[in-house]
Amino acid sequence: MSDVSLNAPPETVAVPGGDVAEYLALLKPRVMFLVVFTALVGLVAAPGTVHPVLAIAALICIAVGAGAAGALNMWYDADIDARMARTAQRPVPRGAISADEALSFGTVLAIGSVLCLGLMANWFAAALLALTIAFYVVVYTMWLKRLTPQNIVIGGAAGAVPPMIGWAAATGTVSFESFVLFLIIFLWTPPHFWALALIRVRDYERAGVPMLPVVSGEAETRRQILIYSLILAPVGVLPAFIGLGGTLYAGASVLLGGIFILFAIACYRQRVGAEAERAARNLFAYSVLYLFLLFAVLLVEQGFGLGSSPLSLPWTL
Amino acid sequence: MANDDAERKRRQRMRSLAIAWALVALVVLFFVVTIVRLGPNVAHPLVK
């Protein structure tokens, strides 16, 4: 994004009525990938075995449900998106797809994904998916996002549920282990999004979104990022103590968590100029890598049946 | 204007095709999931 685009209104398309690619963009493919990936880890880590076809079907439903939530978010937030450089080129603010079309598209996919997950996996997992979509759209998008700087802290719960949905799709229930996976993503969300908010603070200010750096200032945001990172790092190691993660996970989570804290400290200490922005950018980029690697190690270990480390507690939870 | 109309029709056609393929994929998915869920029972009808 160039600086010019920061002040320019979104380019409107000559011919309204979106292309297929525009509808795919409504689904927020990158978020979908993260949702599917974390749900896959929940599904694989769950006890017992699931037929690969049923697992794939469940993951497709979860992916479509996540996409539906993204489309409904773009429908409701079109006014905010139009004022932010990062989002101004999304299909609705650009005029490629009307808000009504985005609403219909999102609603049909949301209902369809929940029904299909219920029929193909189980109704408990479907109820969790429905609750997650409703939480993201109603509680986060419609209510908290425009109301409080704690928006992404509470709203982050929606993004943290997918491993539990994957777990529920495999077992028909949730457990403490799946809650730990939820907790990792829940605690990861604030430092991840606040690092982005530090980079895009003027954007959020212009759009009137009360993100933490806009309301409480950048220094307080950097302090909160550090606090959450200090909590996240040890929680990230927790799977190694409950039999979810093996020796490789134990080592990787300690190392990755330590690096996360170092990036958070750098972000906390660098408060002015280009260095400060670079520190926030580094933390943002690393946070994505951190979550991906943490869950990838879990996936590999669970996939090869290595999910037990010397750190595992001698009792079951 | 004629170009805009042609472009609009092209997009409409692509959307229709995408919906058609999505429906076909859904039918196939339901069929395969049904077979998997029936498992070995599919070869052993309840009628004796």
Image (cartoon, coloured by chain):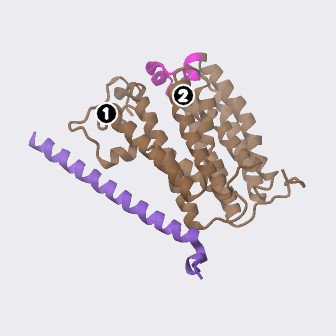
Chain colours: A brown, B purple
The span shown in magenta is A198-215
Q: Quadrant of residue A128?
A: top right
Residue at 61 percent of width and 35 percent of height? A156
A306 part of magenta stretch: no
Residue for badge 2: A197
Rate crowding at label 2 as few (under 14), some (14 to 19) or many (20 or more) other CA atoms within 10 Å. Answer: many
Kind of residue sitting beneath label 1: Arg
Residues A198 and B27: in front is: B27
Q: CA distance from mark 2 to mark 1?
A: 23 Å
A247 left or right of A262 in image: right
| Quadrant of image for the N terminus of chain A | top left
Relative image position of residue A232 (x, y in whole percent): 72, 38
Label 2 vs 1, first from the N-terminus: 1
Relative image position of residue B4 (x, y in whole percent): 15, 41
Chain holding disc 2: A
Residues B10 and A298: in front is: B10
Q: Is residue A240 visible?
A: yes
Up the image or down, B43 lies above or below A168; here it is below
Q: Quadrant of residue A108?
A: top left
For the stretch drawn in magenta, the main secondary structure is: helix
Up the image or down, A196 lies above or below A32; here it is above
Residue at 44 percent of width and 19 percent of height? A206
Residue A226 marker: none
Front of the two marks 2 and 1: 1
Residue furthest left as drawn: B2
